[in-house]
Amino acid sequence: MEINIATAKRKIQEKGFLDVDIDPTLDLFHEIERLKKEKNAVLLAHYYQEPDIQDVADYIGDSLGLAQQAVKTNADMIVFAGVHFMAETAKILNPSKKVLLPDLKAGCSLADSAPADLFKAFKEKHPNHIVISYINCSADIKALSDIICTSSNAQKIIESVPEDQPIIFAPDKNLGAYLNKKTGRNMVLWNGACMVHEIFSLEKITRLKIRHPKAKLIAHPECEEAVLKVADFIGSTTQLLKYAINDSCNEFIVATETGILHQMQKDAPNKTFIPAPPNNACACNDCPHMKLNTLEKLYLCMQYEQPEILMEEQLRVAALKPIERMLEISKAAGLGG
Ligand code: 13P
Ligand code: SF4
């Protein structure tokens, strides 16, 4: 086993995770709870994680809530069950803590759609603009930004900027276009998108609505304009969950990643939640990046404290400023994820 671990550690950059076999009789829920106590670790999970991971997490939330929890925690170790930019944000906020991600290859198509060198050149073409970046971006893009936002605070963040100040919004063009409409601004948009939220089929959603005439369509603002136009409610994952629980309607078509349905079903067991159909033959809207994390990889990363998020200090300090700005504005506005 020790030889296997040594080999797995050497191959971690190539594989993204510790590729070793686990005793199949191990109760991983029990083991993860034990490791949390033993190592004073907190397990933060996004709603798009598989149900088993959500069930063992200390906190499940949207991107803003997760960043706020990462600031608050007294734990020595932050285990992040989410994607790379989320764990990276936790590290930026907590340089002295160990931040672990079960699979380093859990990336994000939206973050990947904004390479730093191209974005820098784009920014130089708009010299009098400030940059508001959606948190789904790399630390390099954060370092080139003035303020970070998430889907739950973006409107407030934009409204905190004087109306005559030109803005570049990156990297999500769908969220940016939605926010331009909401705020009446004319932000210059970077041409990025999320592979999961771009795939919903308006035609199939329309047919589904005919079959379920009482169902409300609730959608994440990363969806395309055509889907957002027919949505009854638009919000971050936490906002969608709260709306589904509190609204008097009993049936919802949910246009976001399917992981959120686990909490919706748990919190409102008598309501019906139908995943919005995507524009392909596959019936699922899983994020392939989020779903790279598994309970086994989670256990292994906690046991062996790898893979760990590491960052150069100069980059961390530059990326911290716009995140702190976001947290300050959110706090003043009473926003929590
Ligand atoms: P929120 O949970 O902040 O709404 O973000 C959704 C998402 O796509 C995360 O990758
Ligand atoms: Fe990125 Fe989209 Fe996956 Fe969220 S759902 S992590 S935005 S690819």
Image (tube, rainbow, N blue to C red):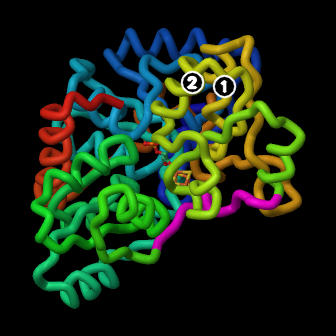
- Of residues 74 and 22, the one nearer the viewer is 74
Residue 47 x/y as whole percent: 54, 33
Q: Is residue 276 visible?
A: yes
Left or right placement of residue 58 versus residue 16 in this view? left
Which residue is labeled 1 in the image? 262
Which residue is labeled 2 in the image? 54
Q: Quadrant of the C terminus?
A: top left
Q: Residue at x 74, y 27 (%)?
A: 251
Question: Overall secondary structure of the magenta stretch?
Answer: loop
Left or right placement of residue 115 versus residue 237 in this view? left
Give the SS element for disc 2. helix
- Mark 2 is surrounded, within 10 Å at the Cα level, by few (under 14), some (14 to 19) or many (20 or more) other residues, namely many
Mark positioned earlier in the residue sequence (1 or 2): 2
Q: Residue at x 84, y 49 (%)?
A: 283
Q: Is residue 266 above or below residue 86?
A: above
Chain part drawn in magenta: 192-203
Rendered image quadrant of residue 164 = bottom left
Q: Amino acid at mark 2?
A: Gln
Q: Is residue 296 visible?
A: no
Q: Amino acid at mark 1?
A: His
- Of residues 207 and 24, the one nearer the viewer is 207
Give the SS element for disc 1. helix
Whether residue 196 appears in magenta in the rendering, the answer is: yes
Rendered image quadrant of residue 253 = top right
